């Protein structure tokens, strides 16, 4: 495990978000993971912040609200395409995603949530703010393809409390 | 002018945001600039997005709402400390910041807003969504030092429509 500045991890993480996705992990009684493809990183409130977006109907949504912390695990050496597809289409309500699907949960360093052993880059975050996207001012062109059912994302603003690689 | 992927510019921009700041520029009848130190970058809505935060009392706030587009200019070779301090403490209501203070406005490529000639890295953005931060769920520790007057930021979510360097 090699600790790094989140600045070193930004481009790789944003690139993976947009190309295949990364894993958003949450702990609690039944730890869960889901694939996300959208998110932002940068400084705010004198902290380093990772903003993740989760639609309200997702199982992870309520788990995240309860937990108040989360991790992001980024595939690096292995693309993990099957695992990303699995974690993005199955719900933790129906299946234990850490059982028999090539995703191994291991404890994080500083938050009570798993990271994924098959990934090589990880962020650990503590939620500082949760806010619903209202969609009122969203450009029509985006509204139509991203929210035909008006299920606007909830934005979780997490302070990055740790960032490290496990692939070198 | 050398066009680059915003991924190449993320770390440098986030680093500068947190250390001295960058310029947020808006066009219109009287173009203006202000120094910002907080912001996020990443993919969302199948676009590349730069989120900037502006408090409602700032002159730039209303200009941004009207304009619907903005640019970010990042100091690279020259630190521009005096210019950043000036643009962060004076209001465009009282002074033309592009007159006699070492900040030269030049037209952007794809949006109707200036970029700053003294900077070497630029983002051009089209606003896709504007949303007030409600602050309801914000961590108390942040609330106390960042919003003692409850003047919560407005978040402007801009699609990055161009990104380029002018310093090489």
Image (cartoon, coloured by chain):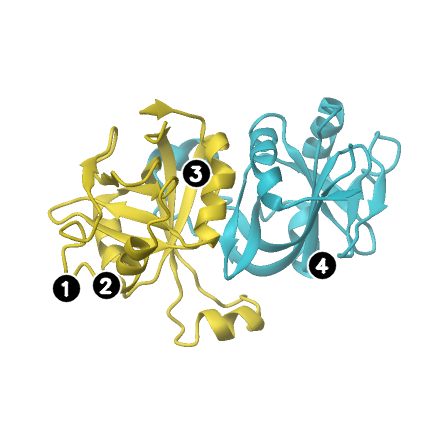
Chain colours: A cyan, B yellow
Q: Is residue A118 left or right of residue B166?
A: right
Q: Which mark is residue B90?
A: 2
Per the model, the C-alpha gap separating discs 2 and 1 is 7 Å
Element at badge 1? Answer: loop
Mark 3 to mark 4 CA distance (whole Å): 27 Å
Q: Where on the picture, by quarter, is residue B133?
A: bottom left
Dot in front, 2 or 4: 2
Separation of residues labelled 2 and 3 (CA atoms): 28 Å
| Residue A67: mark | 4
Marks 2,3: beta carbons within 8 A: no
Q: Element under label 3?
A: strand
**Callouts 1 and 3 close, C-beta under 8 Å:** no
Q: Quadrant of residue A80?
A: top right
* Callouts 2 and 4 in the same chain: no
Q: Residue at x 28, y 42 (%)?
A: B70
Does residue A70 appear left or right of residue B166 in this picture?
A: right
User: Label 4 lies in what chain?
Assistant: A
- The Cα–Cα distance between marks 2 and 4, rounded to whole angstroms, is 42 Å
- Residue at 42% over, 42% down: B50
On whether disc 2 and disc 1 are found on a single subunit, the reply is yes
Could you tell which of marks 1 and 3 lies nearer the N-terminus? 3
> Which residue is denoted by mark 3 in the rendering?
B49
Residue density around tag 2, few if under 14, some if 14–19, many if 20 or more, within 10 Å: some
Q: Which residue does the numbered mark 1 point to in the structure image?
A: B94
Task: Return the x and y of residue B74 as percentages of the image width and height.
Answer: 37, 42
**Could you say which is closer to the camera, residue B24 or residue A139?**
B24
């Amino acid at each position: 495990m090699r600790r790094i500045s989140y600045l070193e991890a930004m481009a790789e993480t944003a690139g993976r978000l947009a190309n295949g996705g990364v894993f958003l992990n949450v702990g609690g009684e039944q730890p869960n993971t889901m694939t996300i493809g959208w998110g932002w990183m940068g400084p705010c409130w004198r902290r380093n912040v990772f903003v993740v977006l989760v639609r309200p109907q997702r199982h992870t949504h309520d788990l995240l609200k309860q937990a108040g912390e989360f991790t992001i695990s980024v595939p690096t050496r292995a693309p993990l395409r099957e695992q990303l597809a699995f974690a993005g289409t199955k719900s933790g309500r129906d299946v234990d995603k850490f059982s028999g699907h090539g995703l191994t949960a291991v404890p994080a360093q500083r938050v009570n949530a798993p990271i994924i052993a098959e990934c090589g880059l990880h962020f650990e975050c503590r939620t500082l703010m949760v806010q619903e996207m209202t969609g009122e001012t969203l450009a029509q062109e985006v509204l139509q393809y991203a929210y035909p059912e008006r299920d606007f994302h909830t934005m979780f603003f997490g302070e990055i409390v740790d960032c490290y690689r496990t692939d070198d």
